[in-house]
Image: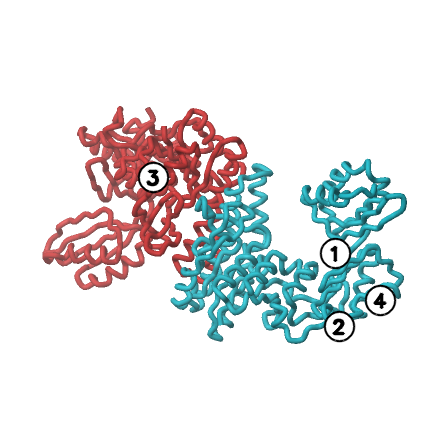
Chain colours: A red, B cyan
Amino acid sequence: MLRVLKFGGTSVGTLDRIQNVAEIIKKFRNQGDDIIAVVSAMSGETNKLIEYAESYTKTPKSDELDMLLSSGERVTSALLSIALNSQGYKATSMSGRQAGIVTDSAHTKARIESIDTSGMKDAIADGNIIIVAGFQGVSQDTGRVSTLGRGGSDLTAVAIAGAIEADLCEIYTDVDGIYTTDPRIEPKAKKLNAISYDEMLELASLGAKVLQNRSVEMAKKLNVNLVSRSSFTPDVEGTLITKEEEIMEKPIVSGIALDRSQVRVGMYGVTDRPGIASAIFTALADANINVDMIVQTVGVDGKTDLDFTIPTTDWEICKTVMEKFKGETENIDYNDKICKVSIVGVGMKSHTGVASKAFTALGSENINIRIISTSEIKISMIIDEKYAELAVRALHDAYELDK
Amino acid sequence: MLRVLKFGGTSVGTLDRIQNVAEIIKKFRNQGDDIIAVVSAMSGETNKLIEYAESYTKTPKSDELDMLLSSGERVTSALLSIALNSQGYKATSMSGRQAGIVTDSAHTKARIESIDTSGMKDAIADGNIIIVAGFQGVSQDTGRVSTLGRGGSDLTAVAIAGAIEADLCEIYTDVDGIYTTDPRIEPKAKKLNAISYDEMLELASLGAKVLQNRSVEMAKKLNVNLVSRSSFTPDVEGTLITKEEEIMEKPIVSGIALDRSQVRVGMYGVTDRPGIASAIFTALADANINVDMIVQTVGVDGKTDLDFTIPTTDWEICKTVMEKFKGETENIDYNDKICKVSIVGVGMKSHTGVASKAFTALGSENINIRIISTSEIKISMIIDEKYAELAVRALHDAYELDK
């Protein structure tokens, strides 16, 4: 069995924790598995280096920033390899370059273009455990080290697992898997055994701390069996994220996600001329604003109302864009005291009554639903933020997710 | 003018000091010079990483230790390049690999085998200041990063200066040059303007903090004009170390060196059979003991006395070797309460009376000379350690080195 294991900054944050990671690797090795471990920088290191760079300028040259930041992962990979070798396990560290990871030249946010796995395959054939410095590759154009941006070490692991056709790609963090909802809100939340890529993408807020969407998307594209588990409780099986067809028991609803980082924009009394909605949303798209949910209600006297949500971080830019439409609108208001609650599950495709159960559950708690949007595997509702936790618990109960 | 500048760990020990280094580079750049700067890791970093590695094992795998230790210089090179670029100076950092430095595969103490300067030449032609991560190269055999051992960044600078035929190779430390003797012993010591390679090698103890013999030897071999100067007082011209022929005024004596780290070994009443001296010194050489000064006095009754000095660090091994010769010796004693005072100067070759002046100077202070050895440009004397400072000052006066 060929396993790609990825250990994040917290999992390798101290020398003791690196030893703990060595124990996990040794256990698999003793079972006869082949192992490629991808490691992040020790927690705090990358931020320290960024602070160093920013002491000179807020806009450091990107290829130099990559030269700087890539050093942290190299340190961890060497330390882990030293630990393993000293304990009688043959291991070799590899930089991104040595692991054959070639990227474009968009320094600090490079994309992996190809992976030449021959070096890794040779090292494995030679009996080595491979420790890859995550988050980095080498730019095809310039030959300089490049980094992959946020979540780059996860991407490294998934891309390697895909290229080398590993059996599993396990992402280790300090959380032992994906839960039916945030356990800090609903203590009865249960860890999921398995979940499909699409559900995981929709449940982003539940996996935000442990899996970035970019990695899940790549895993889906490359057919990589992803596992989210904890390096602090390595005996606990994590959550497998895989193809829908691979999942045996498909619950109707897998989880309840909560997103507090949205602002609701209400445009009232908009002149209802042809193309007005298109003009508004094109302007927002041009400003790189990610509009999420949209509702249009046709009013009277040739006027219409538009309601949509945007990420809180885009609020200021959105206001600037809205200036253009002031002449065509009676009133524009913003409300950030809202949140989005979502019910996610592949089982919805084949079951009816899922949405009505949600409306009933919220209704019985007197929670007003402001906007609703649905997709094949998701129902999202905008409600007042003060009801956030209550709504999550009510829905968790309604779908019996604690069972 | 093409300058190679090397900045040690203390010179780049803080973000402010890296900025200070940037100022030095900018000054030369504004004069129109081309610049290759070689940098060490920020002071303390390498030791920190070694401690990390040694927390797992006292004998970390050498190629992994190189992966680990080489990261410190990469960080400094990127930071310095970021600082320069942000201040409007075009600069590019390079790892040892990118600078074309190829070594053998003796990890942690690799030797530079060749330098492909084409990448650096292209970058210079492109208008870049080059910042090379010192202390490292890439192993020809394995393609893995290698480090050059103690003083490796100096070696990097000298080797690059030689390969690219730079006009100067300036080694910056916190000391502003080579002095006629240690100023802590003789406050009247004067900084030398220029000194020959051979004198510098003999005066090793005076340059120990600023220049390693390995670098001076390489500079001599590659005809590199070496300068020892300080990054903290960059307006002070340092000391030029160059070919004897390049030095205009050649003083008879250039400096007085002191070495306290020797042990005198006395073998008394050695059986005077043919080959006995050869047997003893061959045995010491086989044990990798660097025997320095040797005196043999023929005694009576077919006995002889042998007196020699060894580094204090080899004392224990020497005792073991001496065990073999116990049967052929009446008495062996060791004395580490001695020191070696040396007078160095290329002018000695063509002047007489240099040695007698030394003997007179020490004699008038009642300092007994235990062993004397002379070479073309050096007179060394073993004396009791308690007279060390007195002897240095007496000799400094006798040769009027403060003038």
Distance Cα–Cα, label 2 vs label 4? 16 Å
| Number of other residues with Cα within 10 Å of mark 2, as a class: few under 14, some 14 to 19, many 20 or more | some
Which amino acid type is shown beneath numbered disc 3? Val
What is the distance, in whole Å, between disc 2 and disc 1 at their CAs?
21 Å
User: Is residue B137 placed above or below A325 in the rendered structure?
Assistant: above
| Discs 3 and 4 lie in a common subunit | no
**Residue B302, relative to residue A48: is it above or below?**
above
Q: Amino acid at mark 1?
A: Asp
**Residue at (20% x, 39% y) in the render:** A374
For mark 1, give the secondary structure: strand
- Disc 2 and disc 1 on one polypeptide chain: yes
Asked if disc 2 and disc 4 are in contact, CB closer than 8 Å, the reply is no
Q: Are marks 3 and 2 on the same chain?
A: no
Q: Badge 3 is on which residue?
A: A158
Instruction: Tell me, for residue B402, which label it has, or none.
Output: 2
**Rendered residue at 56%/62% (across/down):** B17
> What residue sits right under mark 1 in the picture?
B259
